[in-house]
Amino acid sequence: MITIPYLTALTTYFSYGLLFAFGQIRDLFRKILDWWSADNLQGYAPICLGLEDFYIRRLYLRIQDCFGRPIASAPDAWIDVVERYSNDNNKTLKRTTNINRCLNLGSYNYLGFAASDEYCTPRVFRSLETFSASTCSTCVDGGTTVLHNELEECVAKFVGKPAAVVFGMGYVTNSAILPVLIGKGGLIISDSLNHNSIVNGARGSGATIRVFLHNTPSHLEEVLREQIAEGQPRTHRPWKKIIVVVEGIYSMEGELCKLPEIIAVCKKYKAYTYLDEAHSIGAVGKTGRGVCELLGVDTADVDIMMGTFTKSFGSCGGYIAGSKELIQYLKYTCPAHLYATSISPPAAQQIISAIKVILGEDGSSRGAQKLARIRENSNFFRSELQKMGFEVLGDNDSPIMPIMLYNPAKIPAFSRECLKQNVAIVTVAFPATPLLLARARICISAAHTKEDLIKALEVISQVGDLVGIKYFPAEPKKQQEEDGRLKLD
Ligand SMILES: Cc1ncc(COP(=O)(O)O)c(C=O)c1O
Ligand SMILES: *[C@@H]1O[C@H](CO)[C@@H](O)[C@H](O)[C@H]1NC(C)=O
C-alpha cells in the first residue's frame, strides 16, 4: 500500500482544490457566455457531460503537451519525439518538422523486439509479401492462415498449456472473453487494481463482481468465504461458478502477483483462476515464461492464462491459453473470434519469430542474453533510484518502476524537464491512477545499454531535485558511489 507523506497529501489536496475552484469559476463564465450567444440551444442535451468532461477541460488540457507526443521512429531504446508548438497557450498543439532524439523510458519494449531485429524483421517482411497486411476475414471464414495455426501452437507450447486462441487485440481479449466464461449467477472476484480491460469485461459479463484488496490473499479468502456463504443475491442459491482474476505484473505499480498464495486460496474454495500476463509473459522467468516460472507455480494450477503480444514480443494482439476443451469452447462461442478480423499476418509472424528467439530456436543465444539483460537492467535501475531517495513502487525483477509524483504540478514539471534533457518518460495520473497518486512510470528494456541507464539516472536525479520528488533521504553519498562503481564494472 502507498502511504502519502502527510504534508504532501495536504499540498496535493490543496493543488487539486485550487484547480477545481478555478475550473468551476471558468465554467461559470462559459455558461454565461453560452447563454448570451444562444447558438448552442438546439434542444439537445450536451453530449460531453459530467465530472470527466470537467476534468479533461480544466485539468488535463492544461498539461496536454505531456501526453500523446507524436513519435517519428520505432519504439527502440532511443526514439524520435516530434517537437510541437502552440499559439494559444497549449490549447492546440501543432507539429513542427523538428525532431528530438530521446532516450525511451516509456515503451513496453521489454526484450527489445519492438525495433528492427536481425531474425524477426526479414521474416515479417516475407510474411507481409505472402499473406498481406490483413486477412480481410474472420477466423471462421477465410481469416485462418497457416501462420495463425502455427501461432496458436507456438503460444500454447510457450506458456505451458495444451491449447491457445489468439485475438487481434489484447484489450479485447479480456473484455470479450470474460463475458463468454461467466454470466448472470456467476461471481468474479477481481484484484482492486486490475486493468481496465478486465474491469470492462467483468462489467459486460453480467456476473456479480466483488473486489479484493490489491494483491492480498488473506482478503481474497475473506471475500470468497463470505460470498460462498451468502450465495447469489436475493435467492441465496450457490454461485454457478467463481472466477478470481489477477495480473502477473501490475502495470501501474510494477508489483509481482502473490500467485502461489492466491492459487492456494482458489484451490481451497474451488474457484477458477484467470491470470493476465500482459506485462510478465516474455519479460520475467528464467526462460521468459512469465510469473509462473518466476514464482515456481505449475501452469496446470492456473485455469485460464491470458497475455498480450504488445509488450515483450513487440507485436500486437492477445491470447488465452488453457485446456483443449476450454479453448475449443471459446472458439465456438467468443464473438471476438467469430466476428472480428483475425490478427494481422505480419504481427503473427513477429510473435512466432520472437518466441523462437526467446527459446533459442533461431540457433543463437540472443534470447537468453535478452532475458538476463532485462533482469540486470531492471534491478540495477530500481536500486539506484531507491538509493537516490525516490519513492519507487514495485518488486525486484519487474521491469516497470513507477516513481511517485503525487502533486499535480509535478506531473508536467517532471515530464517537461526530462524531455528538455532528451529523456522521454511517461507520466500517469487520474483516471489511470487514483487522484492523489500521480506517478512517472519507467519501463526498462533489454535494449538499454549501461550508458543509457546511467544517463537516465543522472537526468532523473537532477530533475528529481528540481521538482522535489525525493521523498526519502538519500543514502550516504560515499557508499552510493562505491556501489555505483561496483555495479558499473
Ligand atoms: C494488464 C493488461 N491487460 C491487458 C492490456 C491490453 O493489452 P493491449 O494493449 O495489447 O490491447 C494491458 C495493456 O496495457 C494490460 O496492461
Ligand atoms: C505549453 O507547453 C510547453 C511545453 O511543451 C511548456 O513549456 C509551457 O509552459 C506550456 N504553456 C502553458 C501555458 O501551459
Image (cartoon, rainbow, N blue to C red):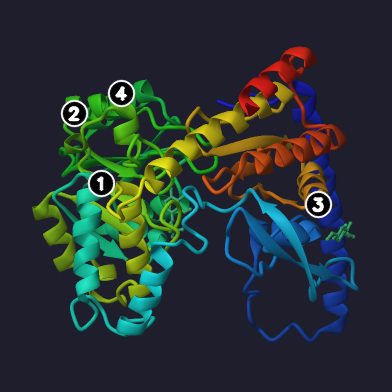
- Quadrant of the image occupied by residue 232: top left
With 408 as the anchor, is 126 left or right in this view?
left
**Which SS class for mark 1?**
helix
Location of the N terminus (image quadrant) = top right
Q: CA distance from mark 3 to mark 1?
A: 40 Å
Asked if the residue at label 4 sits under 8 Å from ligand 1, the reply is: no
Q: CA distance from mark 4 to mark 3?
A: 41 Å
Q: Residue at x 64, y 28 (%)?
A: 488
Location of the C terminus (image quadrant) = top right
Residue most toward the left?
325
Q: Residue at x 91, y 73 (%)?
A: 87
The residue indicated by pointer 3 is 416
The residue indicated by pointer 1 is 159
Which circle's residue, 1 or 4, is located before the other in the chain?
1
Q: Residue at x 46, y 56 (%)?
A: 113
Q: Amino acid at mark 3?
A: Arg
Which circle's residue, 3 or 2, is located before the other in the chain?
2
| Label 1 vs label 2, nearer the camera | 1
With 271 as the anchor, is 26 left or right in this view?
right
**Which SS class for mark 3?**
helix
- Quadrant of the image occupied by residue 457: top right
The residue indicated by pointer 2 is 267
Q: CA distance from mark 1 to mark 4?
A: 20 Å
Q: CA distance from mark 3 to mark 2?
A: 48 Å
Q: Amino acid at mark 1?
A: Val
Q: Amino acid at mark 2?
A: Lys
Looking at the rendered structure, which numbered label has been put on residue 261? Answer: 4
| Label 3 vs label 2, nearer the camera | 3
